[in-house]
Amino acid sequence: MVKGMRFEMNPLSLHKQNHVFVKFAVSFLLLGLGFRLFVSDSIRYSPVVEETHPLSEKTESPQEVSFPAQTPVSIDFPRKEEPVSVHFPGKENQTSQNVTVKCDIFSGDWIPDPSGPIYTNESCHVMEDHQNCMRNGRPDSGFLYWRWNPRDCELPKFDSAKFLDLMRDKSWAFIGDSISRNHVQSLLCILSQVEQAVEVYHDEEYRSKIWHFPSHNFTLSVIWTPFLIKAAIFEDINGVSTSEIQLHLDELDEKWTDQYKSFDYAIIAGGKWFLKTAIYYENKTVVGCHHCPGKNLTELGFEFAYRKALRLLLNFITSSGHKAFVFFRTTTPDHFENGEWFSGGTCNRTVPFKEGEVDMKDVDAVMRNIELEEYEKAAAIGSEKGVTLKLLDTTHLSLLRPDAHPGPYRQFQPFAKDKNAKVQNDCLHWCLPGPIDSWNDLVLETLVNG
């Protein structure tokens, strides 16, 4: 029988129990810590990650992208000529300072320029009498003190030394009508401040010419071909016709095509002559006409002929195998008011138009639309074939300058004998110096910066 029970703790037994407890507790803590680290690392290094691209427009939670100030980001698209738009989510109203934004150099305003032109009619000796307005007695000179200013960038003034260096051992041609001749005179006047050109050729009527710059072995030509396609023309230098123009819509003018492959650069333009009365031929057979009442021919309109001519011209350039640098210049508006050149039209304004003050004439708008449509198709084809085809879009900036035509001062001192004399006005070509000088600023800027 058990009389009583004593529970005694043996010191050695207690020590053993405590040791076991401590080992258990430490093991439990280590196990917990290991589990926590395992879970955390599993989340951190999970192979399934939802990628959010900083340039994606579909990102729902945009991340702010910042670059260290000392490491500017250069975005280079060497084969893309158009301005590049880069989208940073959340930054729609900001422009990265590291992205160069190209502007439209053909969109802008004429602004006052107190410095005036870089040449005068006294320092340049190659301008034709019809464009030498100051010598011919024009009394005002305000038209000389404006410059073209694109809205979103600076347009440098023409650098003659830079241009001539670029043209060393090269050949350049201006191909078109008398506006092209007006343009080449402007370029010659500007370049003459660095080097005088030597005339080495002219045709019988002095309409086509060739100059040479000996120090740079640079050849500059102007080829008078008002339609760019084959034409029989029966009018004198004052525009008086004795018969309708015979225009072959399926044949280019060999006057320029035979020389084309010798040119490294060219500016080609047409337009105004297509408004004249003409009989149209294809396959050497009459197919219609423009403005020929009483001829019993189908009225096809100048639009039909102009599109045909441009398509033929641009196809020749893109398929010739010659990789020249070609500018296609758009049509030049005239500023005849109260009549046309043959019916007493004048241009007596003395300041440029501001944006919105003038609308383009219907015929000019039609021509320009045809030009843009045909150019865009040709430029796409040319880029695939290694042909550089650029648009020299001078139409709008020229439309804003009614003040800078020769007007009555295409003739020498027209009012010297009679202040009320009725004389023919020129409201199409440009005085030299004049706004046409800015066309060369645009040309050089395109050559240098694309």
Image (cartoon, rainbow, N blue to C red):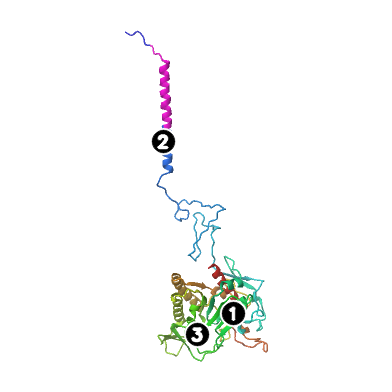
Mark 3 vs 1, N-terminal side:
1
Circle 3 Cα neighbour tier, 10 Å, few/some/many (<14 / 14–19 / ≥20): few
**In the shown orientation, is residue 123 left or right of residue 14?**
right
Q: Label 2's element?
A: helix
Which residue was labeled with disc 2? 35
Residue extent of the magenta highlight = 6-30
**What is the CA distance from the residue labelled 3 to the residue labelled 2?**
93 Å
Q: Secondary structure at mark 3?
A: loop
Residue identifier under label 1: 185
Kind of residue at disc 1 = Gln
Q: Which residue is mark 3?
A: 276
Q: CA distance from mark 2 to mark 1?
A: 87 Å
Going from N to C along the chain, the mark reached first, 2 or 1, is 2
Q: Residue at x 55, y 52 (%)?
A: 68
One can see residue 335 in this view:
no
Q: Point out residue 308 in the picture as x, y percentages from the top left corner.
A: 44, 80
Amino acid identity at mark 2 = Phe
Position of residue 134 measured from the top left corner of the image (x, y, whole percent): 66, 81
Give the residue at the far bottom of this rendering: 242
- Say whether residue 116 is magenta: no
Q: Nearer the viewer, residue 264 or 135?
A: 264
Gap between marks 3 and 1 measured at Cα: 25 Å
Left/right of residue 195 with respect to residue 369 in the rendered view: right
Magenta residue check for 26? yes
Give, as a three-letter code, the residue at label 3.
Lys
Q: Residue at x 41, y 27 (%)?
A: 24
